Image: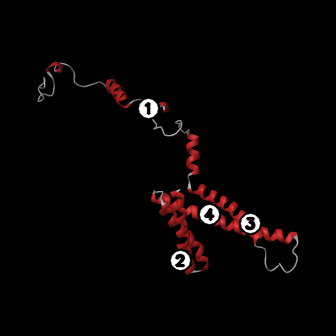
Amino acid sequence: MYPVDPTKTISPATAGKKVFLSDAELDKIALFLVGNQQRFRENIIIPRMLGPVQIKTIEEKRIDSMMESCAFKSIMSCVIGYGLGAAIGLFSSSVNPNVASVERQQSAREILREMKTTTLGYAKNFAVVGCIFSAIECTIESYRGKTDWKNGTYAGGFTGGLIGLRAGIKAGIVGAAGFAAFSTAIDYYMHRS
């Protein structure tokens, strides 16, 4: 089956020739096997899904990594929470006027001052809750290395506990349980639909 005796290390045809290669020949073989050090983007094979395949530039990758950082997520949650809280506070102050001052006629300046106070109060509270929750959730997600419902539940429990601790231990426990349950329900609803 084998034309050459497998017990012999050198074939009879190459017995008189040199066995070792020069450095230049080894370099050529290494370059042939390994390839050159330049990587061309056109040679990358990317699996196609929906739409055309687009390779991100270095700037796009930097922007993506910045937008996925915990600091950016926390700041964005704070800003969006402030805006949402201001909208809810404005609606709340227009629907529920100050009961103590209903007996006498209020001026427009007093009404606007009351609306401003209520709006800013809601805005600050929503901004703080959004910032704390997103920072804790992102930190837990980075530590665990997973994206699932447990991250929101843990973050909700920790955030609710921190907020409730201002009123005492019992309020902290109830706040942690309530916020964790609410976060789990919202996470379930968002991932289900």
Q: Position of residue 102 (x, y in %)?
A: 83, 78
Residue 10, quarter of picture:
top left
Q: Is residue 56 left or right of residue 113?
A: left
- What's under tag 2, amino acid-wise? Ile
Nearer mark to the viewer, of 3 and 1 = 3
Q: Which residue is mark 2?
A: 173
Q: How far, Cα to Cα, is label 3 from label 1?
A: 63 Å
Q: Residue at x 87, y 74 (%)?
A: 106
Residue 160, quarter of picture:
bottom right
The label on residue 37 is: 1
The label on residue 153 is: none
Nearer mark to the viewer, of 2 and 3 = 3
Q: Which residue is mark 4?
A: 130
Q: How far, Cα to Cα, is label 2 from label 3?
A: 30 Å
Q: Position of residue 82 (x, y in %)?
A: 68, 62
- What's under tag 3, amino acid-wise? Phe
Q: SS of the residue at dot 1?
A: loop
Q: How far, Cα to Cα, is label 3 from label 4?
A: 20 Å
